Image: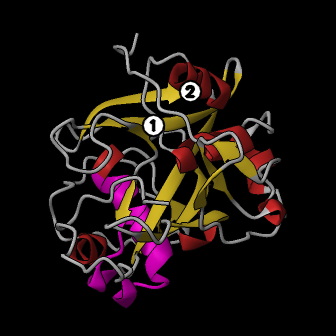
Amino acid sequence: MPSERPDDGAAQPRSLNQVAVPRPAATILLLRDGAAGLEVFMVVRNHAIDFAGGAMVFPGGRVDEADATLGDPFRIAAIREAFEETGVLLARRDGAMLGAHDLPREAPFGTLLAEHSLQPATDALHHFAHWITPTDMPKRFDTHFFAAHTPAAQLARHDGGEAVEGIWINPLDAVRAGDEGRATLVFATRLNLLRLARHKRADHVLADASPVVTVQPVPFIGADGNKWIRIPAEAGYGMSEYKAVTRPMKPIS
């Protein structure tokens, strides 16, 4: 499936038999414990963005070449995207996790870290899932999902550009918003919200030792004549076949 912010660059022209190469991407599930239980920070993508515009997603995007110079490129990309899209910076200075800050999101990420003597907290990320966009899509992404505690002293907020709204929400409430047409959820987002909803607290998510199984959805036409989607049963989402559903979107309330 696509990354949560896969809008970088246009889809490349291809022949009818040519399969697009998936681009490396990373997504982050920023977690906290709210009054009613587990909450995750989600953003609403700008409607002007060509891919999944208007969808409610986890922050994330394409892996940049510079990310590999700072460590594991997928983990670095997840940390960088979280900072650029929400202002939350998962980094340490002298071994201590960074607290409240006013660091500029516009600065080159590697330069910002070096100038402020910060080290990206890649060990704070829990590998949660791995999805690859189906082969029939013109724009494909190889996306690793990571989960992390949000430092209590840091305020998550959308960037006002690519993301036009930010919200802390219980995973099941987000699924209901999608099912009721109050929000748009792409398939991978919905299923990963349902996986999150199995846990009551953030530390329960981060302690989950379930193996990560790569998911590359396979669309097919079922016996009922409708479009269905198949994923590996061993990926741990509870089902292996899902009916493709398109719901009209209503304003988010």
Q: Which residue is mark 2?
A: 174
Which residue is drawn at the image coordinates 74% and 55% (left, top)? 206
Which residue is drawn at the image coordinates 47% and 75% (left, top)? 74
Magenta residues?
Answer: 62-84
**In this orientation, which residue lies closer to the viewer: 40 or 114?**
40
Which residue is drawn at the image coordinates 39% and 44% (left, top)? 100
Where, by quadrant of the figure, is residue 124 drawn? bottom right
Q: Would you say 168 lies left or right of 35 here?
A: left
Helix, strand or loop at disc 2?
Answer: helix
**In this orientation, which residue lies closer to the viewer: 237 or 145?**
237
**Image coordinates for residue 34, horizontal then vertical, percent:** 64, 25
**In this orientation, which residue lies closer to the viewer: 59 or 246?**
246
Q: Looking at the image, is mark 1 or mark 2 nearer the viewer?
A: 2
Magenta stretch encompasses residue 69: yes
Question: Which residue type does callout 2 highlight?
Answer: Ala
Where, by quadrant of the figure, is residue 19 drawn? bottom left
Q: Which residue is mark 1?
A: 42
